[in-house]
Image (spheres, grey):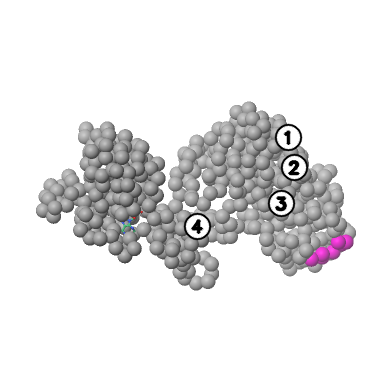
């Protein structure tokens, strides 16, 4: 069966990123390939003494308008679009005196990088490549006859193929698929920038067009369950999907979901913090003088549930912390870094996955697919006025002393990481009981109290949303909680406050809610 092998005799090269260009051009020339190039590319090649035909010689037209017109010419596009398996195309090229191209190597003006550099809108617009994508799309469409390369990392492989006789049809198809993904991502970046930064339709802050492209990372063993298939796709914005895995088995689908929840729970504490997550909910969050102390305290919250958990920290993992973690069966540790000795200790554990992610902050927006669409919201940062104790309203009881207020603030920050309805009990910078994911606030309160056991007495509590009735709060009061922080805002706030007052408990209202569904 024919593999559709086509030799490379004539190549068109126009690259913005000149990395690897010389090696490529030298290799192509040595393999007997005629090279045609655009201005800057041709200059680099010619300066190195490698023969190159300027594209102007092919078009008979000068590169003009500040480079806006270089390759946009029938003599270039006919050479890229002629189907060499169709005799009439071959004949037409002959009549028009146009030579076909067998290989196109292009990379585009750096639009995304220009935007990211904070360049002026005019510079960004000028960095929208027009001729490059036109050629890439033409050659990709005509992959039956032309191989198109958009990735400098492929140059070595390209030379190898050229020297060994050319590209097979299967190669050219894969290259074409890559080329279309490249131009699609490029156009999506341009369209997104126009819609949100350059020409927004209104002042809502939400663009009319929402674009995103992802490239496949690892194919995962399975999805949430073994009968579901799954793969990781990565965008260009960094984050957990790009974390460097330093050790351990491949990440699973559920590992990623839990690690992202752990990241959200731990990353924005100013003190050293550790979050231990199971099934996307915390079974312990704590701050401490260092990571080892924070881990000890977080683990003590619910050692039963912490077994097989996922840990995130906001500081590099130290030897002391690593030795503690190594004692407990842990699926994943995510940290900004690992000290060398800590890495050595943890790497002795075959099954633990160690992920390094320097910037865990995330993009500040979240997308959630729903049937037929996607919901977009800004992330639940802890930056609303109601998140600052200075703005809390003391609804009843005595004003909290410094330690109590610090615990309430810790509990308030931590409760964001708990699925609603969320009730979180804390003491001394550590959770002691977490009630999560119940469909009423009374059950969440019962769960938190039950998990805390004796530790409920004298602890502080945070509720992610208001108590609609006093019943949930009463569970906490009976257990001996000494101070509570909650948003307030229920039509029955007066009876809820009265219940706290009767128990002599301090109650603060934040006016801000932190649901996590
Ligand atoms: N205008 C054109 O006809 C055109 N043809 C190719 N380009 C781009 O020009 C760049 C290469 O230019 P140079 O070789 O001059 O550095 C490549 O990124 C290529 O995608 C063009 N530039 C922008 O559209």
Picture quarter containing residue 328? top right
Lateral position of residue 139 relative to residue 281, left or right: left
Q: Are marks 2 and 3 in contact (CB under 8 Å)?
A: no
Q: Is mark 1 within 8 Å of ligand 1?
A: no
* Cα distance between the residues tagged 4 and 1: 39 Å
Looking at the image, is mark 4 or mark 2 nearer the viewer?
4
Q: Is mark 4 within 8 Å of ligand 1?
A: no
Badge 3, how many Cα within 10 Å: few under 14, some, many 20+?
A: few
Whether residue 85 is in magenta: the answer is no
* Cα distance between the residues tagged 2 and 1: 10 Å
Compared with 275, 113 (above or below) is below
Q: Is residue 302 visible?
A: no
Q: Are marks 1 and 3 in contact (CB under 8 Å)?
A: no
Helix, strand or loop for disc 2: loop
Helix, strand or loop for disc 1: helix
Q: Residue at x 43, y 57 (%)?
A: 111
Q: Residue at x 75, y 46 (%)?
A: 287
Q: Which residue is mark 3?
A: 270
Lateral position of residue 444 relative to residue 233, left or right: right
Helix, strand or loop for disc 4: helix
Q: Earlier in the sequence, mark 4 or mark 2?
A: 4
Q: Earlier in the sequence, mark 1 or mark 3?
A: 3
What segment is highlighted magenta in the picture? 393-399
Q: Which residue is mark 1?
A: 320
Q: Which residue is mark 2?
A: 290
* Cα distance between the residues tagged 2 and 3: 12 Å
Q: Residue at x 63, y 47 (%)?
A: 263
Lateral position of residue 219 relative to residue 455, left or right: left
Quadrant occupied by the N terminus:
top left
Badge 1, how many Cα within 10 Å: few under 14, some, many 20+?
A: some
Q: Which residue is mark 4?
A: 116
């Amino acid at each position: 069966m024919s593999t559709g092998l086509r030799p490379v005799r004539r190549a068109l090269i126009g690259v913005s990123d000149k990395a690897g260009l010389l090696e490529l051009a030298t290799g192509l020339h040595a393999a007997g390939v005629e090279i045609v190039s655009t201005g800057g590319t041709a200059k680099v090649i010619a300066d190195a003494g490698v023969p190159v035909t300027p594209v102007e010689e092919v078009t008979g037209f000068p590169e003009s308008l500040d480079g806006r017109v270089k390759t946009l010419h029938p003599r270039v596009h006919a050479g890229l679009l002629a189907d060499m398996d169709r005799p009439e195309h071959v004949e037409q090229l002959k009549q028009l005196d146009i030579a076909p191209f067998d290989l196109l190597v292009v990379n585009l003006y750096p639009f995304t990088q220009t935007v990211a550099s904070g360049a002026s809108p005019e510079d960004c617009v000028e960095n929208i490549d027009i001729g490059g994508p036109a050629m890439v799309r033409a050659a990709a469409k005509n992959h039956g006859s032309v191989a198109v390369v958009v990735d400098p990392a492929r140059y070595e492989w390209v030379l190898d193929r050229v020297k060994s006789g050319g590209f097979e049809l299967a190669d050219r198809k894969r290259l074409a698929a890559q080329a279309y993904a490249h131009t699609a991502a490029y156009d999506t970046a341009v369209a997104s920038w126009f819609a949100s930064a350059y020409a927004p339709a209104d002042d809502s802050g939400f663009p009319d067009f929402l674009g995103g492209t992802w490239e496949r990372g690892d194919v995962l063993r399975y999805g949430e369950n073994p009968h579901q298939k799954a793969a990781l796709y990565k965008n260009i914005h960094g984050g957990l999907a790009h974390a460097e895995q330093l050790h351990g088995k491949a990440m699973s689908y559920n590992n990623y979901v839990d690690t992202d929840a752990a990241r959200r729970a731990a990353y924005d504490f100013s003190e050293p913090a550790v979050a231990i997550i199971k099934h996307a909910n915390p079974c312990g969050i704590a701050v401490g003088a260092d990571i080892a102390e924070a881990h000890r305290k977080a683990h003590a919250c619910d050692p039963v549930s912490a077994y097989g958990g996922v840990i995130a920290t906001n500081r590099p993992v130290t030897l002391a912390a690593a030795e503690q973690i190594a004692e407990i069966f842990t699926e994943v540790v995510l940290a900004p870094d690992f000290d060398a000795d800590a890495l050595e200790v943890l790497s002795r554990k075959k099954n633990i996955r160690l992920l390094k992610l320097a910037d865990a902050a995330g993009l500040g927006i979240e997308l959630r697919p729903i049937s037929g669409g996607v919901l977009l919201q800004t992330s639940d940062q802890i930056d609303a006025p109601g998140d600052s104790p200075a703005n809390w309203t003391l609804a009843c009881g005595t004003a909290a002393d410094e330690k109590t207020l610090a615990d309430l603030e810790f509990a308030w920050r931590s409760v964001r990481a708990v699925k609603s309805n969320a009730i979180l009990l804390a003491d001394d910078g550590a959770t002691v009981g977490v009630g999560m994911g119940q469909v009423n606030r009374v059950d969440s309160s019962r769960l938190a109290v039950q998990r805390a056991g004796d530790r409920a007495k004298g602890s502080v509590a945070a509720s992610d949303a208001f108590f609609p009735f006093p019943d949930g709060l009463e569970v906490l009061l009976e257990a001996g909680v000494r101070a509570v922080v909650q948003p307030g805002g229920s039509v029955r706030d007066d009876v809820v406050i009265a219940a706290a007052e009767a128990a002599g408990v301090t109650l603060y209202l934040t006016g801000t809610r932190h649901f996590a569904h």
